[in-house]
Image: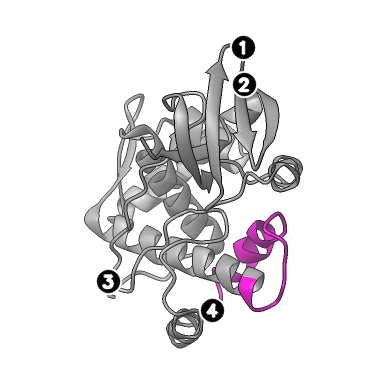
Amino acid sequence: MDRPSLSEAQEDYLKALLLLELEEGRPASTQALAQRLGVRPPSVTEMLKKLAGLGLVQYTPYQGASLTPLGRQIALKILRHHRLLEAYLHQALGYGWEEVHQEAERLEHVISEDLEERIAEYLGHPPFDPHGDPIPTKDLTLPSSKALPLTEAPLGRARVARALAQDRGTLNLLARLGLVPGKPLRILERGEGVRVEVEGEVYLLPRALAQAVGVEPLG
């Protein structure tokens, strides 16, 4: 891939733009990027101008920013590094799923293409990371994920597909409740919270926690 030399911060911006575009289906606002990256909006504006100058971002003040085709390729490569590293840390090194995100954040910028491919080969080219998030393939296509938040899924049988959160506290709680990718459940009732049955146990999940569980309805 013919790509400019980028700093870690610039790579973080491209990945954040990609994730926001995937989540919201539209260009990312300066405010949304600032919240995602934990920086001030003026810093976001300055960085977007630099990335636009490199041909990686299309940026229009007050209208948001989106990735160019080259910017999207680079962002998908960074995301592939990140999610493969999460899978490797979890499966090969025994890290908990609540631990892998921060480690992968540090390592995603420095691994070589050869190491990336060896990790993928060792793991059997997994389509998803430990949280159920899709891993971009070697040719940088993104596997589809049909997960709906529990707050939006129809009542009845479903399967946990993704954790829609990265913070340790939420992931630890989901693990204790058995709400991990692949786990079948039944959605019983939805109101102020969501009542679910998991392996014979019934839980009333607060709305905020239910929004962190992505499920695939089973009919």
Q: Report, in whole angstroms, how far the alpha carbon at label 4 lies from the one at label 1.
A: 45 Å
Q: Report, in whole angstroms, how far the alpha carbon at label 3 lies from the one at label 4.
A: 18 Å
Q: Looking at the picture, which amino acid does disc 1 mark? A: Glu
Secondary structure found at label 3: loop
Secondary structure found at label 2: helix
Please identify, in this view, whether the residue under mark 2 or under mark 4 is nearer the observer: 2
- Structural crowding at the residue carrying mark 3, measured as other residues with C-alpha within 10 Å and reported as few (<14), some (14–19) or many (≥20): few
- 156 horizontally vs 67: left or right: right
Task: Tell me the residue at 44%/88% (across/down).
Answer: 114
Q: Report, in whole angstroms, how far the alpha carbon at label 2 lies from the one at label 4.
A: 38 Å
Query: Decide: marks 3, 4 in contact (CB < 8 A)?
Result: no
- Structural crowding at the residue carrying mark 2, measured as other residues with C-alpha within 10 Å and reported as few (<14), some (14–19) or many (≥20): some
Tell me residue 101's x, y (percent).
64, 57
Please identify, in this view, whether the residue under mark 3 or under mark 4 is nearer the observer: 3
Q: Which residue is mark 3?
A: 139
- Structural crowding at the residue carrying mark 1, measured as other residues with C-alpha within 10 Å and reported as few (<14), some (14–19) or many (≥20): few
Query: Decide: marks 4, 1 in contact (CB < 8 A)?
Result: no
Q: Which residue is mark 1?
A: 192
Q: Report, in whole angstroms, how far the alpha carbon at label 3 lies from the one at label 2.
A: 38 Å
Q: Looking at the picture, which amino acid does disc 3 mark? A: Asp
Q: Vertical placement of 142 versus 27: above or below? A: below
- 124 horizontally vs 110: left or right: left
Q: Earlier in the sequence, mark 4 or mark 1?
A: 4
Q: Earlier in the sequence, mark 3 or mark 4?
A: 4
Task: Tell me the residue at 34%/29% (across/down).
Answer: 61
Q: Which mark is residue 207?
A: 2
Query: Decide: marks 2, 1 in contact (CB < 8 A)?
Result: yes
Q: Which residue is mark 4?
A: 111
Q: How many marks?
A: 4
Tell me residue 8's x, y (percent).
55, 62
Q: Write the start and end of the magenta stretch as one range.
A: 91-111
Q: Earlier in the sequence, mark 2 or mark 1?
A: 1
